[in-house]
Image: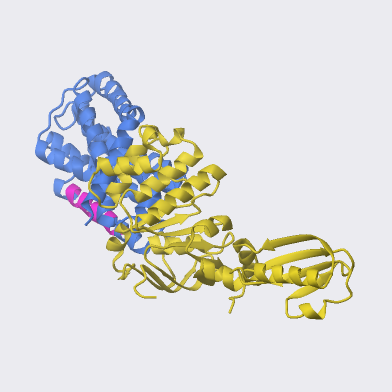
Chain colours: A blue, B yellow
Amino acid sequence: MNLRGAVAIFNHELVRFFRTAFGSILSPVLTTSLYFIVFGAAIGSRMQEIGGVPYGAFIVPGLLMLTLLSESTSNASFGIYMPRFTGAIYELLSAPVGVAETLIGFVGAAVMKSLIIAGIILVTATLFVDYSIAHPVLAVGYIVLIAAAFSLFGFILGVWADGFERLSIVPMLILTPLTFLGGTFYSIDMLAEPWRTVAQFNPVFYLVNGLRWTFTGNADVPIGVAFGMTLGFVLLCVVLIALIFRTGWRLRD
Amino acid sequence: MDHPILDIRNLSKTYKAGTTALAGVDLQIRKGEIFALLGPNGAGKTTLIGAVCGLLRPTGGTIEAFGLDVARNWRQVRQRIGLVPQELSFDMFERVDHSVAYSRGMFGCPPNKDRIEQVLRSLSLWDKRTSKIRELSGGMKRRVMIAKALSHDPELLFLDEPTAGVDVELRRDMWRQIGALREAGTTIILTTHYIEEAQAMADRVGVINKGRLLLVDDKAAIMAKLGSTEARISLTQPLGEVPSVLESYQLALEDHGTTLVYRGGDGSGKGKREAAEVIKMLVEQGIGFDAIDTSESSLEDIFVDLVERGEVPA
């Protein structure tokens, strides 16, 4: 394996991230902070506890998930789409770089970026809401897993996209609605039938509840199911990326 | 050819849309040479390079580089190949030195500031090392592309239209740099529209059109085989026919007998010699003339002729 190649891509991506720090860090942190202010501090103080957890603390995992999904997806998709767009992809294709190096480089960097943003958001959240993390080690592990899963997904999206519009369609029109409807702001118990059943078909519902369990110790679904689904998604994405490289789909004519 | 550095056999590429870009190309490249691949737009030059460098998947045939099958040993092979594509393709907001160091790392080489400095200095980019690429002129950007390709010290370098769109002065400067690379032992394959470029630099020349290699030979051999001299002699009095003493030369009368035209030679100087002999015999025969216009066919004439005929010369 060309480890130096992987590290070069990883560092290159991180440099690009910090070069555009204003948009890539400040923007998601500001947006999430606004949610904390409005739903956590302002409205949250008038809401009942959910499952024994104050409303402000209840929404922290959901909002963190919202940021993780959108940032992981967009960071990874832009990472691979930009060289395709500028033509600089020739360098990647002509270099001794395979699937493993690409994943470590592009996806690893996207994961790192998401973790940096997630860390900043968690620190920022303490300014507006009181929360604690019941299972900190599992929380970190799960956050890394989610970031990896959606960075892999973002990479596939970046290979598939043939324009900037497509890059933004999936995060805006699919991931964000699914996250909002996946229990970011409410428990499934608060829904009436048939919506309670419908909600269980939303895959993001399991991710939000998995993360919520690591924070509060309570969730609407068994934690094993949430972890299993996330791992399965990671494996599916890895297989798809391996297929992309094997067939050259959208990369090599 | 013994142990070519690059050995392409029966290479073909048909795109999904049905366009055949390469139709059974055979090509062997010698270690240390500069090989110029000439051809009009859409001839298959870039496709050929892309197939060797891994940018596309050939439909058929085999490619061996350094004695290794490119498809099976792609890691080892790619590490030893450099590519400068035709388009200026990079992150325009990146610093010059960072961009070159990134390329070196991607090809598996350890960080080496001295080597990066050496490459940048050799291409007159050292003073611009901290500049963002978008701030550079077109010629400078082209040099950055070359610096990136040289950063991992490739043994085989592909230059796809390296001087396209650059001014004459910079083009000659690049020729000098490419010559210096050859001196350092790098094998260079370049594609170009500029016949002048091939004539000035190449050891061997290949002419490709419609995915077929029409000709591959030493530049000097091509000139000898297909080059010719033309001498146009304006006579003071028109002639009805070519004098019998000159019948052994390739002569023709044009412009109602007022111009005696010699066409012959083989690019080795034979044409000039024969033209001089004709002049001498005209003087001896008392045939008056008041002007002589001679010209040598260039590689460009040969190229145009080959492409127009689309035939492989004997």
Give how far across and how far down residue B123 sits, in percent: 40, 42
B195 vs B26: above or below: above
B245 vs A10: above or below: below
Per the rendered image, the range of residues in magenta is: A226-240
Give how far across and how far down residue A7 sits, in percent: 23, 46
Instruction: Answer left or right for B80 relative to A85.
Output: left
Report the residue at 48% width, 55% height from top. B160
Q: How many marks?
A: 0
Give how far across and how far down residue B303 sits, in percent: 61, 65
Report the residue at 40% width, 33% height from top. B132
Of B188 and B13, nearer the camera is: B188
Within the magenta stretch, is there residue A19?
no
Residue A194 visible in image: no
A134 vs A91: above or below: above
| Quadrant where the image shows the C terminus of chain B | bottom right
Residue A61 visible in image: yes
Report the residue at 66% width, 69% height from top. B273
Give how far across and how far down residue B100 sits, in percent: 34, 43
Within the magenta stretch, is there residue A238?
yes
Kindly report the secondary structure that dominates the magenta region of the rendered protein.
helix
B241 vs A130: above or below: below
| Quadrant where the image shows the N terminus of chain B | bottom left
Of A67 and A186, nearer the camera is: A67
Instruction: Answer left or right for A190 relative to B307.
Output: left
